[in-house]
Amino acid sequence: MQDIKEKIRFTVSALLYFLFNLRIGSDLSTSLQATGWQILQTAPFVAGFTYLIVSVLQYMGDGSKLPWDRRLRLFFAIGIMAGLILAIWEYGGVTFS
């Protein structure tokens, strides 16, 4: 039963990651293009922060490696926060003049 709960949590984390990075356009192709561009822009930063956090956790855990599903869940959690912050930034209409 624990294995099924972990798979469900992982799937929900992935869906929330895509939901928070979803960018709405005038039609489906525009939405998919904007969402893909959003993910491509944020993925390197999210991966870098995830790498740092995983490195610290492994150092604190005496070198024991984290499982891949935990690493990806950390990636999704950081990506959700980044997507939320960028969505607020974009939809808030912040401009520099």
Image: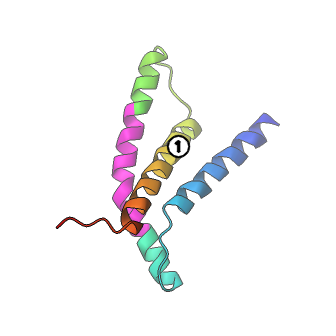
Which residue does the image show at 42% across and 54% down from the upper left? 85
Q: Residue at left 42%, top 39%?
A: 50
For disc 1, the marked residue is 72
On-image quarter of the N terminus: top right
Give the farthest residue toward the left: 97
Rendering coords of residue 31 (x, y %): 48, 77
**Residue 61 lies in the magenta-colored region:** no
Residue occupying the point 45% across, 56% down: 83
Principal SS element in the magenta part?
helix
Percent of width and height locating residue 74: 51, 40
Residue type at numbered disc 1 = Leu
Magenta residues (range): 36-52
Residue 91 lies, in percent from the top left, at 41, 68
Q: Dot 1, crowdedness within 10 Å: few (<14), some or many (≥20)?
A: some
Q: Which image quadrant: the C terminus?
A: bottom left
Count of labels shown?
1
Residue 9 falls in image quadrant: top right
Q: Which residue is the extreme one toward the top?
A: 62
User: What is the basis of the colouring in this image?
Assistant: rainbow
Whether 40 is drawn above or below 67: the answer is below
Using the image, determine if residue 23 lies above or below residue 75: below
Residue 46: say if magenta. Answer: yes
